[in-house]
Amino acid sequence: MTGQVLYKGKMGGSSRDGVGISYLNQEDIFLGALTVRETITYSANLRLSKKMDKNEINEQVERTIMEMGLEHCANNKIGNWHLRGISDGEKKRLSIALEILTHPYVMFLDEPTSGLDSASAYFVILALRNIALHGRIVVCSIHQPSYYLFDLFDDLYLLSGGQVVYFGEANMAVKFFAESGFPCPARRNPSDHFLRCINSDFDNVASTLLRSKTITGITTMPDSVMNLSTQEIKEVLIEKYKISEYSTNARDKIQDLILLEENIRLSNKSKARSSKQLSTLIHRSLLNMSRDMGYYWLRILFYVAVAISVGSMYFKIDTSFLAITARAKCEAFIYGFMICLSIGGLPSFIEELKVYNREMLNKHYGEGLLSISNFISSLPFLVVIAVSSGTVVYSMVKLHSGFSHFCYFCINFFCCISVIECSMMVVAALVPNVLMGIGIGTALIVFMMMSSEIFRPLPDLPKFFWRYPMSYISFASWALQGVYKNDMLGLEFDNLEPEDSKLKGETVLLTTFGIPLDHSKWWDLAALMCLLIFHRLLLFVVLKYKHRVSLVFCNLSAKRIFKLRGLPMRASSSRSSRDRTTLPTMRNKNFHPLSSLEDLTSPPP
């Protein structure tokens, strides 16, 4: 589908940056380990002007909490898989609170009442009306609102199949339908009546049930006042609206608003310093990672448990001839299979990336800051994993003695974990759900292990694909070469025959494992670090261009579908709107808590 995005009658492009517009998705996405106040405070530090000091930012946060009626749950955690949190209605109001922090002039909301009970839905729409009364434009799409919600609307925009059925004052819609020959029956919700007239799904479901003959008493049009099909009713309404005074009034109002707002300069672009944004992102991620048990703490426990198991299996390996194979198998298990525990972080990665994607699409910060902050915030936990499990294995197995050898082992293990963690972040950024991410992440690790020393020496690998380029881009290949050199160089092993001379570690590496000695173990470690940098850059590229590429493919897919069905291309449009632009702004006045209006309170969590 094609169309134009206009702002004040002019082309605005696809970016909302710099025009005072915010968008609220249907899904409420948060870091569940944070409290309501912490979530709003971090968002304020990311977006509010650098000229505001800490006290002014805190005042803005408290004013926003009060405006959305979140005072009673401000210190409650939002909630996740192991933490009980706030209610769905409170989550929706928290989503709105995050968007009104910077006082956007226009707010777009996608089905803000979806999944809410009647009380929560009413409270959310009342909150939006309270925002609109302070001089902002609120545009939201809602399917089948209740009578109480419908009564709160200022303007109504009805669409069916991409065509305008009605656009005007909400309280005049019933009159328009009556004038068109389709009056709203008594004791019926007007929104239900409108939907019944313009939604062809009613006819489709009724005809399907009639053909199935499983339910009796079904007619194609149960209303006696409407003996036409939905398509016929819709065509009548569309033609009536085109020549009605409601259409003329709507066009005149649009022109008046364009003239009224032509001198308004708006911007919701973040004005915070990049250094402040980076420190805020790092602090928020650290807090979330430390509170979320499934993010790193469980994996640290599993890593240590597996390390103890490996240490007990290869306890105190000596330098006998059979110990050569045992050492290799021990190190191959650590770097080939123990590393697979990193897949356990995928669910947390995916949930956190949802928050980042929402914030980046709303221009809160850039992809570069996200990539850097994620690495820095995860650094302490990765160090704990590498040092704790590395210490257990090294002390129990009795690998090559010496503090420098132990440090190399831990650094090598840390780099290996960091590379695979970043790889899982890239997978999480590309896949739509956890199950697909686990499948793709597992396959990726398997491919990396197959081209390493685990299953076949490097010189024996087929040159096409496996030797070149897979063995060079595999983290396991470089990690194992380095750790083998670190452990065996400088050691002497017993020969198969006791009377024969001892085998040097260099000979074992060349003849048994086919590991080249033309470069030191530090070059292998440097290659791992280069792979880490490469994967971080890859994550940056994926985050930056994923959305743009997906839009291109969606556009091509839509054109293909329209072409196959022989349908004309139509400009897309909003489905309903609420507009109070003619009211004077009161943004700088003191807000009153929403919970004080009509003695309403939010449903208990």
Image (cartoon, rainbow, N blue to C red):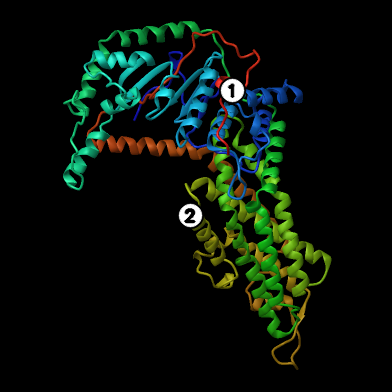
SS for tag 1?
A: helix
Tag shown at residue 435 = 2
Tag shown at residue 545 = none
Q: Identify the residue at horizontal 36%, vertical 26% (top origin).
A: 572
The mark lying in front, picked from 1 and 2, is: 1
Q: Position of residue 475 (x, y in %)?
A: 61, 59
Q: Give above or below for 121 relative to 460.
A: above
Q: Is residue 316 left or right of residue 441?
A: right
- Residue 519 picture quarter: bottom right
Q: Position of residue 280 (x, y in %)?
A: 70, 35
**Can you name the residue that lies furthest to the bottom here?**
499
Amino acid type of disc 1?
Answer: Leu
The reply to whether residue 371 is in sight is: yes
Per the image, the residue denoted by label 1 is 594
How many numbered callouts?
A: 2
Of residue 421 and residue 594, the one placed in the foreground of this image is 594
Q: Identify the residue at horizontal 22%, vertical 38% (top origin).
A: 206
Of callouts 1 and 2, which one flags the residue occurring earlier in the amino acid sequence? 2
Amino acid type of disc 2?
Answer: Leu
- Residue 167 picture quarter: top left
Q: Position of residue 31 (x, y in %)?
A: 61, 41
Indicate the quadrant containing the N terminus: top left, top right, bottom left or bottom right: top left
